[in-house]
Amino acid sequence: MAEVASVLFRREDIRGRVDELGRSITRDYAARAPVLISVLKGGSIFLADLIRVIRLPVAIDYMSISRYGGAVESMGRVRIVKDLDEDIGGRDVIVVEDIVDTGLTLSYLLSVLESRQPASVEICALLDKSARRIAPLDIRYTGFDCPDVFVVGYGLDVGERYRNVPDILAVADVGAVTEDPDLLLPFVEGEPPTA
Ligand code: IMP
Ligand code: MG
């Protein structure tokens, strides 16, 4: 059987890159107190690792959105299911995303956030699938350029599964995984958690 999925970004490379991004943000926002916003659920894993390497008094906040169909059909328009807890007026905002694909969702969200008059808004995306970009976006911080493949792990899901895989996997046959969601279990069970 052909391989259904393979490791695209290894956990140690992710960790190294997250450390670098944290250092860049620490430098760029010296003497400031940015608020990092994550869009649930995928970005929350990246955010959790990222804030622990930022040496600044950061705040975090979450938004949950629901799409009207796919990103393209909806032109990125989303319904805000859970809004931010705090007012971002006058704040330096960093939107932390797992992956930017067409960019439609994020560009819509940016317009919502910018209407609240923050001091600044920047994007920090772990993965940039730039080949599929429809809405142009200026991504200030990028973890990795991502090829045009479906990826799971480190927060990214397929049908709400596999967000807990420590590596990022390229899924060669998404149809097969949709049909049999257990196919990628070896990547979850591969090794026991260390103490
Ligand atoms: P877009 O940039 O508006 O197309 O949507 C980006 C969102 O789609 C991301 O935040 C993910 O939730 C999801 N997404 C895009 N590509 C992938 C992928 O390869 N694997 C898992 N989720 C993805
Ligand atoms: Mg997302």
Image (cartoon, helix red, strand yellow):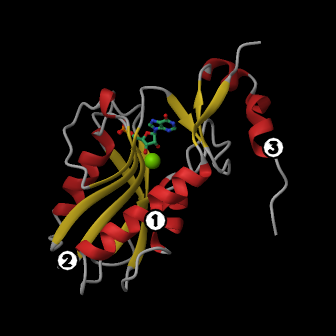
Can you tell which mark lies on residue 63? none
Name the quadrant of the N terminus.
top right
Residue beneath the point at 59% across and 45% down: 10
Circles 2 and 1, Cβ within 8 Å, touching? The answer is no
Q: For residue 101, what is the image quadrant?
A: top left
- Amino acid on which the number 3 mark rests in the picture: Gly
163 with respect to 194 (left or right)? left
Q: For residue 2, what is the image quadrant?
A: top right
Q: List x then y, in percent, for residue 128.
A: 36, 41
Q: Is residue 137 above or below residue 27?
A: above
Q: Is residue 82 visible?
A: no
Residue beneath the point at 71% across and 21% down: 179
Circles 2 and 3, Cβ within 8 Å, touching? The answer is no
Neighbourhood count class around disc 1 (C-alpha, 10 Å): few under 14, some 14–19, many 20 upward? some
Quadrant of picture, ligand 1: top left
Report the Cα–Cα distance between label 2 and label 3: 45 Å
29 with respect to 40 (left or right)? left
Label 1 sits on residue = 19
Report the Cα–Cα distance between label 3 and label 1: 25 Å
| First-in-chain label (2 vs 1) | 1
Residue beneath the point at 63% across and 43% down: 160
- Amino acid on which the number 2 mark rests in the picture: Gly
Label 3 sits on residue = 190
Comparing labels 3 and 1, the label whose residue is closer to the camera:
1
| First-in-chain label (2 vs 3) | 2
Label 2 sits on residue = 89
Q: For residue 170, what is the image quadrant?
A: top right
